[in-house]
Image (cartoon, rainbow, N blue to C red):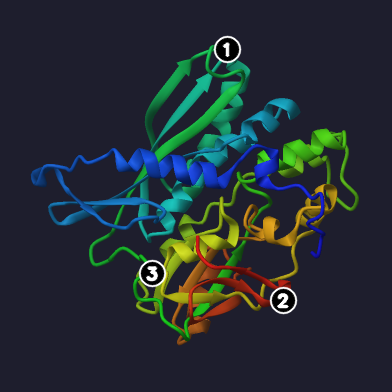
Amino acid sequence: MGASTEGGWTYSRSGVDRGAVAGSLARLLAQVHGSSVPSHGRPVHLPGHYAGLIRIGRETIAITTDTIGTKGLLAEEVGAWEGVGEDIVAVNVNDLASVGARPSALVDTISVAKPSPEVFEQIGRGLDRGLRTAGITLLGGETAVVPELVHGYDLGGTAIGFFPRGRRPVTGSGIRPGDIVLGVPSSGVHANGLTLVRRLLREHRIDLAAPRPGGPGPVGLELLNPTRIYSPVSEAVADRPEVQGFAHISGGGVRNLARLSGRVAFVLDHWPVVPSLFRWIQELGAVASNEMFQTFNMGIGFAIVSRPRRLSETLRRLARAGAADALVIGHVERGRGVRLPDHDLAYPAY
């Protein structure tokens, strides 16, 4: 994982400038001064967190929205759409899982230049599979035919969740030095970093129908493997008093942990062996390790921050929820940011 930075590819070079995104968003938010009428609900102030929370009476509702990004372009190129249908569910319910909310429903949005019944059917099959895994329903959605805006398919959704009686949102506010960090493996690149990956595929004229060296099958299908859904994982331990925080390792990579607390340092000193798919991507573009770990999930898609007590019970609960592969990946110290000592990497903030 020690690729040189000289001439190496970055997310920014592929067309996604994180700084420009952050700056533009800050300008937008500076113009938004509206507040809700108290009888319509009171927002819970959690800046930078995964989902928005609002209290309505005695209930707290969690809301999140996301798209699958340019993974849809890869699906179009390969001609395989079921997986991205599942991704629509996953990218949203995983953010709900990151505040300990139980997902309830989803509405989808599809913007398309020209609808294809066959493609919609495939997307629908994937959507259904994702909804069943997350235990939620599809309430409806929006299909927009906008050939002047999009040239293929832009897929996303909005999900809502709630907190069962007695459960409080899991926000990370109680995280302290001495806590441990558990990781649940990913199922591949998920739906992040595909702009960079696709640029490298074009640059090197990679045959998407052929396997990469040591790969399990066509690399196009490997990259389209659906995002793992972590809501059952969160649900299994969200009520446990020792559990202090969840993190969806999506866009931003391991830096996402810093969204939970700016008052501690997350030291990931037991990161597992990085899957060969990510090592291949890194070698393909001479991508620096610093860039890899802040662009991709690098094999861990969801993190749980917990007190060290009753670790065995927590792992048993996770195993019963389908995450028998969960493992300890680090701990919490005094300081701030995220560190990976074995890779000589440090990120001071999200």
Instruction: Check the image and name the residue furthest to the right.
Output: 213
Nearest to the eye among marks 2 and 1: give it.
Answer: 2
Q: Residues within 10 Å of mark 1 (few under 14, many from 20)?
A: some
Secondary structure of residue under mark 3: loop
Q: State whether residue 309 appears in this view.
A: yes
Q: Residue furthest left?
A: 39
Mark 2 crowdedness (10 Å alpha carbons): few <14, some 14-19, many ≥20: few
Give the Cα separation between the discs numbered 1 and 3: 44 Å
- The percent position of residue 317, horizontal first and vertical second, equals 49, 72
Q: Position of residue 8 (x, y in %)?
A: 79, 50
Which residue is denoted by mark 1 in the rendering?
114
Q: CA distance from mark 2 to mark 1?
A: 49 Å
Q: Nearer the viewer, residue 327 or 26?
A: 26
Give, as a three-letter code, the residue at label 2.
Answer: Asp
In this figure, which residue is indicated by the disc labeled 2?
342
Comparing 283 with 345, the one in front is: 345
Please, what is the three-letter code of the amino acid marked with disc 1?
Answer: Lys
The correct choice, above or below, for 126 with respect to 133 in the image is above
Tag 3 residue: 172
